Image: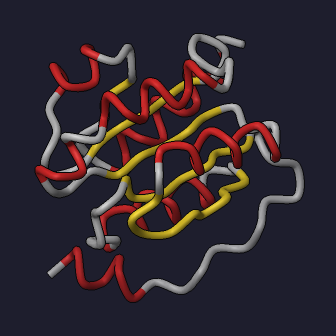
Amino acid sequence: MPWLKSMMEKEPPEPESPLGTIVIGNLEPDLHDSAKEMVRKALKRAGFKTVDLGKAVAPQTFASKAKEVNANIIAVSINTKPAKDNLPKLDQALTDAGLKGKIALMIGGAAVKKEDADAISALYGKSKEEAVAIAKKVIEGK
């Protein structure tokens, strides 16, 4: 069970010279954080500073924390239909905060597809490996 092995992996160390800063969390009301944790650890191992907001995070919280820490990327895990239904609210929160188009939004999870990401101009990844590749491309493109 490779997923169990990855869940039990210890916390990676903080990168000394981070490639960038990523605010990560589960969009409310999603409480399934195992996928988010795997992605967060993979991003951290790849050299990114991660700011974990946890589970059931309000759209406005993603926006305000991203501004506060001067994040390069917001990564959102969406594993339930009610959380997917909050994507327009997340999009609006980023627009209201003046972050739309200035900060990369990355989504993934069991409840979303590429079409959902395209609808709000977000990047989409299906796995922790894709999340790392997308994050690196975002940083290289800046």
Q: Quadrant of the C terminus?
A: top right
Quarter location, residue 96: top right
The answer to which of 7 and 76 lies nearer the viewer is: 76
Q: Residue at x 26, y 15 (%)?
A: 118
Q: Quadrant of residue 102?
A: top right
Q: Position of residue 20 (x, y in %)?
A: 74, 39
Horizontal arrangement in the rendering, residue 34 relative to residue 114 (left or right): right
73 sits left or right of 32 in the view:
right
- Determine if residue 38 is in view: no
* Display colour scheme: secondary structure
Q: Residue at x 35, y 58 (%)?
A: 28
Please state the horizontal and vertical placement of residue 123, each as a whole percent of the image. 38, 24
The residue sitting at 50% across, 69% down in the picture is: 54
Q: Is residue 20 above or below residue 98?
A: below
The answer to whether residue 31 is above or below residue 90 is below
Observer-nearest of 38 and 123: 123
Q: How many marks?
A: 0
- Work out whether residue 122 can be spotted: yes
Q: Please, is residue 70 above or below residue 80 in the view?
A: above
x and y percentages locating residue 89 in the rendered image? 38, 34
Report the residue at 20% width, 43% height from top: 84
Residue reaching furthest right? 16
User: In which quadrant of the rendered view does residue 1 lie?
Assistant: bottom left
